[in-house]
Amino acid sequence: MTNFIDNEKLNQVLNSVSPTDGKIEEIIKKSLNKKRLNLKETATLLQAEEPNLIRKIFIAAKKLKSQIYGERIVLFAPLYIGNKCINDCNYCGFKSSNYEVERSTLSKLELQREVKVLEKQGQKRAIFVYGEHPDYDADFIAETVRLAYEMKGAGELRRVNINAAPLSVKGYRKLKEVGIGTYQIFQETYHYQTYQQVHPSGPKSDFNWRLTGLDRAMEAGVDDVGIGALFGLYDWKYEVLGLLEHTIHLEENYGVGPHTISFPRLKEATNLKVNNKHLVTDQQFKRLVAILRLAVPYTGLILTAREKPMLREEVMKLGVSQIDAGSRIEMRGYTDFEKEQDVKKEQFKLGDTRSLNEVINELVQEGYLPSFCTACYRLGRTGEHFMEAVKPGFIKEYCTPNALLTFKEYLEDYASKESKQVGEELIEAKIAAIEEQQLREELLNKLELINRGQRDLYF
């Protein structure tokens, strides 16, 4: 598999469009009909600079998000397993030349302690993060996932996603056997020249190997994958097209695009070695999220805790479906939760350091439905099967009831008295809004079973 990103093509598309009221409205209409946009259509949205056109894009993104995902927000937490790395990425606090960072890997006991803390907080979904190092091969990753799934106690992690280096087909097959969730690889930047500049050494300097990493995952049967770009390394409009081109490539070759797209912005880290030319403003950030929502209607959009709470609140309305909460991104960060976060020990600086309970309270106050649902993955509704369910619009039939069940669990097992009261009020309102009587009755029955002590119920 070779490089399928043509820099000249993407730049040409970006510079060949001229947005007008009529064109923007036509493109928005297509997106609201739940059709993925092509490169030219997306470029037209990207080049719309008039405030009136940007306003129309924002309104459409909010509407589309509501139509497909409703008001639910899926929650997860990152867990750093090891920060040893042989890459020297200019933008990363864990780069090999940064000697201020203490390198370590969680022992079996330390991993179990970190997972136990996450479970006591109420987390059900985690993403395990690994540096790129020979120690972190497929066997090692598989063992850490196996350990996490085996743990039962105050709660349990029901889905472990992976953020790690690209593997061989054989390596991905080992991870499929232990039941990983999404395998996530960020290209960081789709602009080849910039990619080479910011990745001067290490395996990550191979643009093509990283770009085709998820092709090998698909070939191994891992059909739930996530892509992403680090916005701030190159022109944000180009990177949006790069993400779309990657999506189109996966769709055309494997019948299904990425399950998620991430769009983190470049943040402070120790010994940062990148210029500020392409840093993304808050307004540009909101635009790129809204445009991604319109360009790929059925793909989950992940907003990270890199951003501050107020901006996260604004951006969620524009199409975000998943956020991390209660996050710690230094080694042993959850067992040392009381200690002040130190950017010298982190891969980058967090903007939102609130606890999971604080984030959930804020979500409920804003009318969102917090969700820890993992049902689709455990019932095999992934890849093409997931798209078969989501594209006709039936996903809300699964997602809202399952979100309510997992939120009910959280309220019963982890929430404060005040949080439980407002949470129960939200659940009652959501149940009342379900029109189908049979579904409503089945949901009420399952909620009563949770009241009686049963757990892990889903549709």
Image: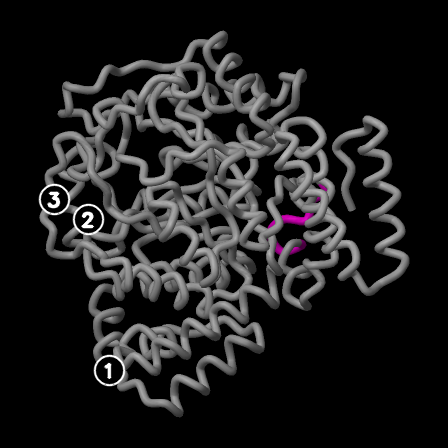
Tag 1 residue: 16
291 or 97: nearer the viewer: 291
Residue 459 spot, x, y in % from top left? 78, 46
Sequence-earlier tag: 1 or 3: 1
Q: Earlier in the sequence, mark 3 or mark 2?
A: 2
> The disc labelled 1 sits on which kind of residue?
Ser
Q: The disc labelled 3 sits on which kind of residue?
A: Val
Q: Does dot 3 land on a helix, a strand or a loop?
A: loop
As measured in the structure, the alpha-carbon distance from the residue carrying label 1 to the one carrying label 3 is 29 Å
Upstream in sequence: badge 2 or badge 1: 1
Q: Is residue 108 above or below residue 121?
A: above
Q: Which residue is mark 2?
A: 195
Q: Residue 212 location, x and y as percent?
A: 37, 48
* Residue at horizontal 31 percent and vertical 21 percent from the top: 340
Nearer mark to the viewer, of 1 and 3: 3
Mark 3 highlights which residue? 274
